[in-house]
Image: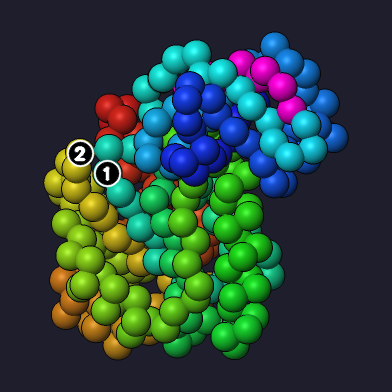
Amino acid sequence: MHHFFVEPEQMTEGLARIAGGDLNHMKNALRMKPGEEFLVSDGTGGDFLCRLEELDGREARARILERREGRELPTGIWLYQGLPKSDKMELIVQKAAELGAAAVVPVATKNAVVKLDERKGKDKARRWQTIAKSACEQSKRSRIMQVEEPVSFARALEQIREQNFDLRLIPYENQEGMAGTKAAFESLRPGMRAAVLIGPEGGFDEEEVRQAQAAGVIPVSLGKRILRTETAALTVLAALMLKLEGGI
């Protein structure tokens, strides 16, 4: 079933009104016809089953048939991702959206090979946000995952302090033992908010880890093997998703 996102103000008088790029996609790519049913999410956590009534050059209008239970995790997980090389960030953004992350914040760390100036950072963020929206539609999420513009490591720690996350984790290759990881994961409860810092290909500098700890971030191990940056990010998100949804 097709899935589209709208703003709350586009849901009025029992109708969902769809315009812009999604309207073009409905008409030209999907070739949708009146009578077809699809899902609409309004960005507030609500999912609605709708039936297309009519579409023209300005908008598509669909009758709201019923509200359905949302598909969001009960905990907001923010992924602070050290900037990786090549197109790995696109993969991380896509999979983070599928796994239920609330937001991805690209972070410029000491060992990151990639360096983005302000203009390139804005352009990349727009591209990553488009990927996030597509992944959220595909995975039938109720909200679009937020992708922020790249920030410095110091700014990332400031954000984590300011937003007062309940759980703050930094997977670190020199951290030994899984008992601390297990305890940290098990402490996460519905309604809480979590921040996870993932290093780039070169890993975190020791001073960055010390600075993170001073900000209340807990170093944890992800096992005896060294994981690539994209693997580490998705490992943590998948484990937290399964824990929160009762899988483990």
Mark 2: which secondary structure? loop
Q: Is residue 224 visible?
A: no
Residue 111's x, y, as percent?
A: 49, 84
Q: Is residue 80 visible?
A: yes
Q: Nearer the viewer, residue 226 or 238?
A: 238
**Quarter in which the C terminus is drawn:** top left
123 shown above or below 66: below
Residue 180's x, y, as percent?
A: 18, 55
Instruction: Magenta stretch: give its range.
Output: 48-55
Q: Nearer the viewer, residue 227 or 200?
A: 200
Q: Residue at x 64, y 27 (%)?
A: 61
Q: Residues within 10 Å of mark 1 (few under 14, many from 20)?
A: some
The reply, left or right, for residue 22 in relation to residue 28 is left
In the picture, the disc for residue 75 is 1
**Quarter in which the N terminus is drawn:** top right
Q: Residues within 10 Å of mark 2 (few under 14, many from 20)?
A: few
Q: Which residue is mark 2?
A: 190
What type is the residue that disc 2 sits on? Pro
Residue 24, quarter of the rendered image: top right
Reply yes or no: does residue 160 show up in magenta. Answer: no
